[in-house]
Image: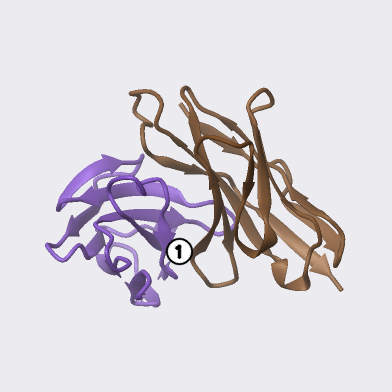
Amino acid sequence: AQSVAQPEDQVNVAEGNPLTVKCTYSVSGNPYLFWYVQYPNRGLQFLLKYITGDNLVKGSYGFEAEFNKSQTSFHLKKPSALVSDSALYFCAVRDLGSLTDSWGKFQFGAGTQVVVTP
Amino acid sequence: DAGVTQSPTHLIKTRGQQVTLRCSPKSGHDTVSWYQQALGQGPQFIFQYYEEEERQRGNFPDRFSGHQFPNYSSELNVNALLLGDSALYLCASSLEGLETDTQYFGPGTRLTVL
Protein backbone atom coordinates (compact mmCIF):
# COMPACT_ATOMS: atom_id res chain seq x y z
CA ALA A 1 0.00 0.00 0.00
CA GLN A 2 1.11 3.55 -0.59
CA SER A 3 0.78 6.53 1.71
CA VAL A 4 1.78 10.16 1.97
CA ALA A 5 2.28 12.19 5.13
CA GLN A 6 2.46 15.94 5.48
CA PRO A 7 3.38 16.38 9.13
CA GLU A 8 2.55 20.09 9.38
CA ASP A 9 -1.01 21.36 9.13
CA GLN A 10 0.26 24.91 8.72
CA VAL A 11 3.54 26.64 7.99
CA ASN A 12 4.01 30.32 8.79
CA VAL A 13 6.82 32.30 7.18
CA ALA A 14 7.66 35.95 6.70
CA GLU A 15 7.89 37.29 3.16
CA GLY A 16 11.43 37.02 1.82
CA ASN A 17 12.33 34.11 4.09
CA PRO A 18 12.89 30.57 2.87
CA LEU A 19 9.86 28.29 2.75
CA THR A 20 9.88 24.54 3.32
CA VAL A 21 6.85 22.24 3.23
CA LYS A 22 7.54 18.68 4.35
CA CYS A 23 6.38 15.43 2.78
CA THR A 24 7.23 11.81 3.45
CA TYR A 25 5.94 8.83 1.53
CA SER A 26 5.68 5.07 1.51
CA VAL A 27 5.38 2.92 -1.62
CA SER A 28 6.22 -0.65 -2.45
CA GLY A 29 7.98 0.22 -5.70
CA ASN A 30 9.67 3.27 -7.16
CA PRO A 31 7.74 6.42 -6.36
CA TYR A 32 6.47 9.05 -8.69
CA LEU A 33 6.14 12.18 -6.53
CA PHE A 34 4.23 15.39 -7.12
CA TRP A 35 3.46 18.74 -5.55
CA TYR A 36 0.25 20.61 -6.22
CA VAL A 37 -1.02 23.95 -4.89
CA GLN A 38 -4.64 24.91 -4.26
CA TYR A 39 -5.93 28.44 -3.91
CA PRO A 40 -9.30 29.11 -2.23
CA ASN A 41 -12.25 27.78 -4.21
CA ARG A 42 -9.97 26.56 -6.97
CA GLY A 43 -8.77 23.21 -8.26
CA LEU A 44 -5.25 21.92 -7.81
CA GLN A 45 -2.42 23.39 -9.87
CA PHE A 46 0.60 21.28 -10.77
CA LEU A 47 3.91 22.59 -9.40
CA LEU A 48 6.51 19.92 -10.04
CA LYS A 49 7.20 16.19 -10.15
CA TYR A 50 9.95 13.67 -9.56
CA ILE A 51 10.06 10.61 -11.78
CA THR A 52 13.74 9.76 -12.05
CA GLY A 53 17.08 11.47 -12.44
CA ASP A 54 18.36 14.42 -10.41
CA ASN A 55 17.17 14.48 -6.85
CA LEU A 56 16.59 18.24 -7.02
CA VAL A 57 13.57 19.07 -9.13
CA LYS A 58 12.71 22.60 -10.23
CA GLY A 59 9.14 23.59 -10.89
CA SER A 60 6.78 26.50 -11.40
CA TYR A 61 6.84 29.86 -9.60
CA GLY A 62 10.37 29.37 -8.22
CA PHE A 63 9.56 26.22 -6.27
CA GLU A 64 11.84 23.22 -6.08
CA ALA A 65 11.77 19.91 -4.27
CA GLU A 66 14.41 17.47 -3.12
CA PHE A 67 13.91 13.74 -3.39
CA ASN A 68 15.64 11.80 -0.61
CA LYS A 69 15.30 8.07 -1.05
CA SER A 70 16.91 7.07 2.22
CA GLN A 71 14.59 9.32 4.22
CA THR A 72 11.62 8.68 1.88
CA SER A 73 11.03 12.41 1.73
CA PHE A 74 10.14 14.93 -0.94
CA HIS A 75 10.18 18.36 0.71
CA LEU A 76 9.03 21.43 -1.22
CA LYS A 77 11.19 24.52 -0.98
CA LYS A 78 11.31 28.10 -2.11
CA PRO A 79 14.31 30.32 -1.33
CA SER A 80 12.30 33.51 -0.86
CA ALA A 81 8.57 33.32 -0.09
CA LEU A 82 5.99 35.78 -1.42
CA VAL A 83 2.67 36.76 0.13
CA SER A 84 1.04 35.34 -3.01
CA ASP A 85 2.46 31.90 -2.12
CA SER A 86 -0.11 31.68 0.67
CA ALA A 87 -2.19 28.64 -0.27
CA LEU A 88 -2.80 24.97 0.47
CA TYR A 89 -0.07 22.64 -0.72
CA PHE A 90 -0.51 18.94 -1.43
CA CYS A 91 2.10 16.26 -1.87
CA ALA A 92 1.08 13.19 -3.88
CA VAL A 93 2.63 9.85 -4.73
CA ARG A 94 1.92 7.44 -7.53
CA ASP A 95 3.18 3.87 -7.30
CA LEU A 96 4.01 2.46 -10.70
CA GLY A 97 6.61 0.02 -9.47
CA SER A 98 4.58 -2.95 -8.37
CA LEU A 99 1.42 -4.72 -9.43
CA THR A 100 -0.64 -4.13 -6.34
CA ASP A 101 -4.13 -2.77 -5.89
CA SER A 102 -2.68 0.69 -5.52
CA TRP A 103 -0.83 0.54 -8.85
CA GLY A 104 -1.13 3.76 -10.78
CA LYS A 105 -3.40 5.52 -8.31
CA PHE A 106 -2.59 8.95 -6.99
CA GLN A 107 -2.44 9.19 -3.19
CA PHE A 108 -2.58 12.72 -1.80
CA GLY A 109 -1.46 13.97 1.57
CA ALA A 110 -3.83 15.90 3.82
CA GLY A 111 -2.31 19.21 2.78
CA THR A 112 -0.27 21.96 4.44
CA GLN A 113 -1.59 25.49 4.70
CA VAL A 114 1.15 28.02 3.98
CA VAL A 115 0.74 31.51 5.37
CA VAL A 116 3.22 34.14 4.24
CA THR A 117 3.05 37.42 6.16
CA PRO A 118 4.26 40.75 4.78
CA ASP B 1 -5.84 25.94 -25.10
CA ALA B 2 -8.83 25.11 -22.92
CA GLY B 3 -8.07 23.64 -19.53
CA VAL B 4 -10.22 21.21 -17.59
CA THR B 5 -13.76 22.50 -17.11
CA GLN B 6 -16.41 21.27 -14.72
CA SER B 7 -20.11 21.96 -14.29
CA PRO B 8 -21.97 23.00 -12.32
CA THR B 9 -19.84 25.12 -9.99
CA HIS B 10 -22.10 24.60 -7.01
CA LEU B 11 -24.93 22.22 -6.28
CA ILE B 12 -27.31 21.74 -3.37
CA LYS B 13 -29.19 18.46 -2.97
CA THR B 14 -31.10 16.68 -0.23
CA ARG B 15 -30.45 13.26 1.21
CA GLY B 16 -31.57 10.41 -1.00
CA GLN B 17 -31.41 12.39 -4.20
CA GLN B 18 -29.20 11.67 -7.17
CA VAL B 19 -26.64 14.01 -8.76
CA THR B 20 -24.66 14.17 -11.99
CA LEU B 21 -21.45 16.16 -12.31
CA ARG B 22 -19.75 16.87 -15.61
CA CYS B 23 -16.18 17.29 -16.76
CA SER B 24 -14.48 18.23 -20.01
CA PRO B 25 -10.80 17.32 -20.13
CA LYS B 26 -7.95 19.53 -21.21
CA SER B 27 -7.62 19.67 -24.98
CA GLY B 28 -5.74 16.62 -26.24
CA HIS B 29 -6.25 14.57 -23.07
CA ASP B 30 -8.00 11.21 -23.16
CA THR B 31 -8.03 10.08 -19.52
CA VAL B 32 -10.27 11.44 -16.79
CA SER B 33 -10.03 10.85 -13.06
CA TRP B 34 -12.47 11.91 -10.36
CA TYR B 35 -11.63 12.87 -6.80
CA GLN B 36 -13.60 13.75 -3.70
CA GLN B 37 -12.12 16.41 -1.45
CA ALA B 38 -13.83 16.79 1.90
CA LEU B 39 -13.29 19.96 3.87
CA GLY B 40 -9.80 20.09 5.35
CA GLN B 41 -8.63 16.94 3.61
CA GLY B 42 -6.66 15.95 0.57
CA PRO B 43 -8.36 14.65 -2.58
CA GLN B 44 -9.47 11.01 -2.45
CA PHE B 45 -9.39 9.01 -5.67
CA ILE B 46 -12.82 7.81 -6.82
CA PHE B 47 -12.14 6.29 -10.24
CA GLN B 48 -10.45 6.79 -13.59
CA TYR B 49 -11.85 6.45 -17.10
CA TYR B 50 -9.95 5.67 -20.27
CA GLU B 51 -11.38 4.61 -23.63
CA GLU B 52 -14.88 4.88 -22.15
CA GLU B 53 -14.10 2.21 -19.55
CA GLU B 54 -13.56 2.45 -15.81
CA ARG B 55 -9.92 1.49 -15.50
CA GLN B 56 -9.28 1.95 -11.79
CA ARG B 57 -11.40 2.53 -8.73
CA GLY B 58 -10.76 3.79 -5.24
CA ASN B 59 -12.56 2.80 -2.05
CA PHE B 60 -15.95 4.26 -2.88
CA PRO B 61 -19.30 2.44 -2.83
CA ASP B 62 -21.26 1.50 -5.92
CA ARG B 63 -23.45 4.56 -5.37
CA PHE B 64 -20.64 6.35 -7.17
CA SER B 65 -20.61 5.61 -10.87
CA GLY B 66 -19.31 7.27 -13.96
CA HIS B 67 -19.22 7.43 -17.67
CA GLN B 68 -16.84 8.61 -20.35
CA PHE B 69 -18.06 9.71 -23.75
CA PRO B 70 -16.37 9.32 -27.15
CA ASN B 71 -15.20 12.95 -26.97
CA TYR B 72 -13.43 12.05 -23.68
CA SER B 73 -15.72 14.13 -21.49
CA SER B 74 -16.98 12.43 -18.39
CA GLU B 75 -19.79 12.33 -15.85
CA LEU B 76 -19.80 11.38 -12.20
CA ASN B 77 -23.11 10.11 -10.83
CA VAL B 78 -23.88 9.71 -7.15
CA ASN B 79 -27.09 7.95 -6.09
CA ALA B 80 -28.87 7.95 -2.73
CA LEU B 81 -26.95 10.97 -1.48
CA LEU B 82 -25.77 11.04 2.11
CA LEU B 83 -24.80 14.02 4.22
CA GLY B 84 -21.23 12.72 4.11
CA ASP B 85 -21.14 13.12 0.33
CA SER B 86 -20.87 16.88 0.79
CA ALA B 87 -17.49 17.79 -0.67
CA LEU B 88 -15.61 19.40 -3.52
CA TYR B 89 -15.54 17.01 -6.46
CA LEU B 90 -12.51 17.40 -8.66
CA CYS B 91 -11.96 16.15 -12.16
CA ALA B 92 -8.44 15.66 -13.49
CA SER B 93 -7.35 14.84 -17.00
CA SER B 94 -4.20 13.39 -18.46
CA LEU B 95 -2.86 11.90 -21.67
CA GLU B 96 -2.25 8.18 -21.85
CA GLY B 97 1.37 7.57 -22.71
CA LEU B 98 4.52 9.37 -21.64
CA GLU B 99 2.63 12.05 -19.75
CA THR B 100 0.33 9.76 -17.80
CA ASP B 101 2.08 10.84 -14.63
CA THR B 102 0.87 14.45 -14.72
CA GLN B 103 -2.76 15.24 -14.04
CA TYR B 104 -4.39 18.61 -14.63
CA PHE B 105 -7.29 19.53 -12.40
CA GLY B 106 -10.49 21.43 -13.00
CA PRO B 107 -11.88 24.01 -10.55
CA GLY B 108 -14.24 21.49 -8.99
CA THR B 109 -17.94 21.22 -8.21
CA ARG B 110 -18.97 22.03 -4.65
CA LEU B 111 -21.75 19.62 -3.63
CA THR B 112 -23.77 20.30 -0.50
CA VAL B 113 -26.16 17.63 0.75
CA LEU B 114 -28.81 18.81 3.20
Of residues B47 and B11, the one nearer the viewer is B47
Residue A45 location in percent, x, y? 52, 63
Query: Is B56 located above or below residue B71 in the figure?
Result: above
Instruction: Name the residue furthest front.
Output: A54
Q: Quadrant of residue A94?
A: top left
State which chain disc 1 sits on.
B
Q: Quadrant of residue B27?
A: bottom left
Q: Is residue A107 left or right of residue A71?
A: left
Residue holding disc 1? B88
Q: Which chain is brown?
A: A
Which quarter of the rendered picture does the C terminus of chain A lie within?
bottom right
Q: Is residue A61 in sight in this rendering?
A: yes
Q: Residue at x 23, y 51 (%)?
A: B49
Q: Is residue B25 left or right of residue B85?
A: left
Of residues B65 and A81, the one nearer the viewer is A81
Q: Please tell me how crowded label 1 is: few (under 14), some (14-19), or many (20+) other residues with Cα within 10 Å.
A: many
Residue B51 location in percent, x, y? 15, 51
Residue B5 location in percent, x, y? 35, 73
Rendered colour, chain B: purple
Q: Residue at x 18, y 58 (%)?
A: B68
Q: Residue at x 24, y 60 (%)?
A: B77
Residue A49 location in percent, x, y? 53, 47
Instruction: Name the residue furthest left.
Output: B70
Amino acid type, mark 1 = Leu
Q: Residue at x 42, y 60 (%)?
A: B104
